[in-house]
Amino acid sequence: MGSVNDLENFRKELASNLKNTEKNKVIIKIAMSTCSIATGSKNILDYFNEAMLKQSSSYRIITTGCTGLCHSEPTVEVKLPGSEPVMFGPVDVKTAEAIINEYIVNGKSVDCVIGRN
Amino acid sequence: MSCCENNIQIKETVRSICAEFNNDPNELIAILHKAQNHFGFLPKEVQNAVADAVKVPASKVYGVVTFYSYFTMVPKGKHPISVCMGTACYVKGAEKVLKELEKELNIKNGQTTSDGRFSMNTLRCIGACGLAPVVMIGDKVYGNVKPEEVKNIIKEYVPNV
Amino acid sequence: MDTKQLKIALRNCGITDPENIEDYISGDGYAALGKCLSENDRKQVIEEIKRSGLRGRGGGGFPTGKKWEFAAAGSDKKYVICNADEGDPGAFMDRSVLEGDPHSVLEAMAICGYAIGSDEGYIYIRAEYPLAIKRLRIAIAQAEEAGLLGENILGSGFSFKIGLKYGAGAFVCGEETALIRSMEGKRGEPVMKPPFPAEKGYMGKPTNVNNVETFANIPAIINKGADWFASIGTEGSKGTKVFALAGKVNNVGLVEVPMGTTLRELIYDIGGGILNGRKFKAVQSGGPSGGCLTEKHLDTPIDYESLKAAGSMMGSGGMIVMDEDDCMVAVAQFYLDFTVEESCGKCVPCREGNKVLYQILNKITHGKGEITDLDKLKNFSEVIKSTSLCGLGQTAPNPVLSTISNFYEEYYDHVVNGKCAAKQCRALIEYRIIGDNCIGCGACKKACPSEAISGEIKQTHLIDQEKCIKCGACIKKCRFNAIVIE
């Protein structure tokens, strides 16, 4: 980028892409910081990567840093199109399965919801 | 581990590591990090070779090696065990975990088992206080470790007989 | 859940992908740098930071804008350094910021470089943080690729590059003069100030050192304005502070609260109270330089001055909660053990004095303390505080002084009555069998590794105190609550 204008234009483009993604896709955020990884978030990430392939909904998986919720790692945040994000934790493969089959597919609530600060 | 390399080979390797940093004495710590990565530890021969390459007295290299706890002059075990002794781990009972490890491996903190499989040391907070008490074996972090779990954790690293 | 938190330094942590610069830019990433380069001259940037009231988050609390102003004077080659040598046991704020939002630190360092007239910055990071190092490397490469670091940033004519330097495990290197010496490949021993790093720092050149969290606040201040930032917090402490809440608290984690939040709100409302319903005893802030505060301090608002007045300090943000099972003498000993180990050895009061403090504490926890030891502890502490060379020694006795003043009766109990109420000091406790509860099952006898328990089956058993090594094996095996610690 050669100027501040370039940067601002790029930002606008990215922001509108993001808006589109949020409108049309399920966004799954998985925390991948040292503490999350130590509690097994890598397995959860692998699970989502694999299991979501079999789903018809279009989605984006984003790995993030620390959510600050060390007491509930591994955490997964799911945002369905048009609704507020919901945070789950601690998530194991079994709850991950429920998150996909119940919440993402049917919009039904799943145990292990934690609040978002 | 390449602890059996002879002196000429050691010098050769050290020379090429130092050259990557333009033999700059200001980069001494970066050089020692790289050397320890390669050799597993920093014996006298390696320190002398570093001193030669960056043209500083060997005493200065020794001074730096002994100042920083990350550098070690004795070979570590194949599976280095680090017990976190940060405050959060301390109040959650890290000392009991340490004692149990010492008992289980029959070595003291800072030593290596005679078969070279395990070495043990304590460190000051790896920043995973949410999981206290924490034990690291190699790169793997074990959280919320209870003394009675130590035996099973160790077992993961011992091949079945 | 808890609305008491306000995230400024952690605004992107857990929200964006730290390994993707586009995620950062799509919010307001690098907008602050763009704003500085296109709209503000150097003086205006420094003025803005000064007006915001931001103070150093590494523990010292020095006004950041003033620090930048000192470093900006003169036209020599200058350096910007980010202190990421997070060595406080029990603190992990910096690691979380670097792992979760590395670009905000890079952007802030570039802004600082622009403001003070520097073209080169370094992040001094602990080698023990491999993930943070990896993400910083990725972030630097992406920012260079995008033209947000390197030569002629955004066509402004301003150039700035950032490199990494690794620590090697020395707590004292968090002190800025020691950090600079370590960056130069030397032993990390502090030197006398003045000259301050702002005059003569890395490679003898003017150098500005700020902590990770301090930097993480900068882009938000530039984007939202100094007035916005200054409207948060208390009179003398503006903005928010990140705390690593750990120890015996239910919701262990990383929290960010406005200055002025009370300790009670932090521990009970956000932290969810004490683990297992135990009773709160103390909260330790400021790491080995800080102090232990008690029940009566719970309504203290968190800011630099109030915590200091209460006998602790802000520190870098470790907040360790302790309950009734923690012995405060042993806690003080734990911190002194740390300082003795980490003292660089350059000045006598710190090297020798702290060792003496440790030995006295060790004597007390082993049941050999005398009442005169308490005065000795206090006197030695004062001497070490007033005569040590650097911050490490000057603050090392704080855990001793604060526990003596807040938990005097506990020290007294140890030296006069030979009792440790928390039952942590082995030399001061005894395992006993309650005759009424013992059914003589023999489980404890079998479990005892030192053959200290005698008694026939179906008869009340007895522990021989001479032989007992106080390992606690018997109490774990007893199913009839027949063994107590006294």
Image (cartoon, rainbow, N blue to C red):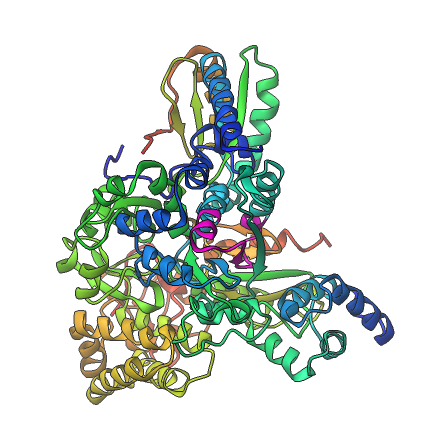
- Residue closest to the eye, B153 or C185: C185
- Camera-side residue of A116 and B89: A116
Say above or below: C439 vs C418: above
Residue C116: in magenta span: yes
Position of residue C239 relative to residue C371, above or below, is above
Percent of width and height locating residue C28: 42, 32
Q: Quadrant of the N terminus of chain C?
A: top left
Q: Quadrant of residue C35?
A: top left
* Tally of numbered discs: 0
Q: Quadrant of residue C349?
A: bottom left
B111 or C243, which lies in front? Answer: C243
Residue B134 falls left or right of residue C324: right
Could you tell me if residue C477 is visible in this image? no
Report whether residue C134 is seen: yes
Q: Answer left or right for B39 relative to B150.
A: right
Please check the rendered image and state whether residue C251 is part of the magenta-colored stretch, yes or no: no
**Left or right of C232 on screen, residue C21:** right
Q: Quadrant of residue C72?
A: bottom left
Image vertical order of residue B138 relative to residue C424, above or below? above
Q: What segment carries the magenta color?
A: C110-133
**Image coords of residue B11 (percent x, y):** 82, 73
Residue C326 in picture, x, y percent from top left:
28, 64
